[in-house]
Amino acid sequence: MVNSFTHSMFGKIGSTVCRLGLSGTNRPGKKVIYKALDEGINAFFCYGFDFQTISVLRDVVRGNRDKYVIATGAYNLIFGHPNLRRTLEKRLRQLGTDYIDVFLYLGVMKEKQYPDNIKDEFCKFREEGKALTIGISCHDRKFVGRLADEGTLNAFMMRYNAAHRGAEQDIFPYLSRHNPGIISYTATRWGYLLRRPKNWPKEERIPTASMCYRFVLSNENVDVCLMAPSNEAQLIENLTALHDGPLSDDDMVFMRRFGDAVHDAKKYFM
């Protein structure tokens, strides 16, 4: 398959995904998650406590496992981590599946929080076939760029939006060698890209949620851009991004300029 604005081949696992994925962390309700499935969403991220998402996925994967790409992981606790194998086995039981498509070490803030013993254990999960791809969710972009170029990991989850574009220099140029699967999140920068920042001219427009998702999806390096709607109305608005297609050149310039204004207004934000 040739990647398009709406669909991508996720990394090397051979699964075609809708490039707009769903996280149910904001508890939108099972009805909304089923609605997303009806609209063609087939890539999902869940924590172990995302019971609505887990319940729906457990229902739909029976006999159709290869139609869905499921990402989850174990969390870096800064001063330690949960038992990684126990976490993986628990998630397999919760989801009623024999394997996880993308198993991540979540919340890595810097390189020393991902030591070799963690990497080795994740590699064992992949060798056993219990995780098709392994990777990390990380805020240290340069570290992710080095890992991508190295090729041991074959999936990464990162922040990417109009206000946080550092991945364009630090990560994306290093993907072509090994083609890892890329998941992005917070396309709206936790809602800040939907609000008027300080000193933004009152006569100028502000982005819609659809524009924020289209900004991310306009970058071919991103396989899945996660959305986390709180209700059906938000889901429907987000889905318009798939139908509206890539941003025009003028809208792309606007999004980058607005993103800079948001970033400059919140410089303290991590």
Image (tube, rainbow, N blue to C red):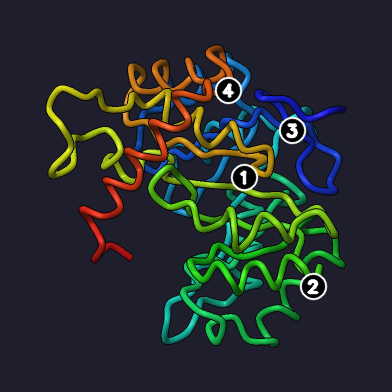
Residue type of the residue flagged with mark 3: Ser
Which of discs 2 and 4 lies nearer the camera? The answer is 4
Which of pointers 2 and 3 lies earlier in the amino acid sequence? Answer: 3
Q: Which residue is mark 2?
A: 150
Quick one: SS at disc 4? loop
Q: Which residue is mark 3?
A: 8
Residue type of the residue flagged with mark 2: Glu
Q: Where 207 falls versus 256 (above or below)?
A: above
- Rendered residue at 85%/48% (across/down): 12
Relative image position of residue 206 (x, y in whole percent): 26, 27
- Rendered residue at 81%/68% (across/down): 151
Badge 1: residue crowd in 10 Å (few <14, some 14–19, many ≥20): many
Whole-number angstrom distance, CA of label 2 to CA of label 3: 23 Å
Relative image position of residue 131 (x, y in whole percent): 76, 58
Badge 4: residue crowd in 10 Å (few <14, some 14–19, many ≥20): many
- Rendered residue at 41%/40% (across/down): 256
Q: Which residue is mark 1?
A: 95
Which of discs 4 and 1 lies nearer the camera? The answer is 4
Which of pointers 4 and 1 lies earlier in the amino acid sequence? Answer: 1
Whole-number angstrom distance, CA of label 4 to CA of label 3: 15 Å
Which of pointers 2 and 4 lies earlier in the amino acid sequence? Answer: 2
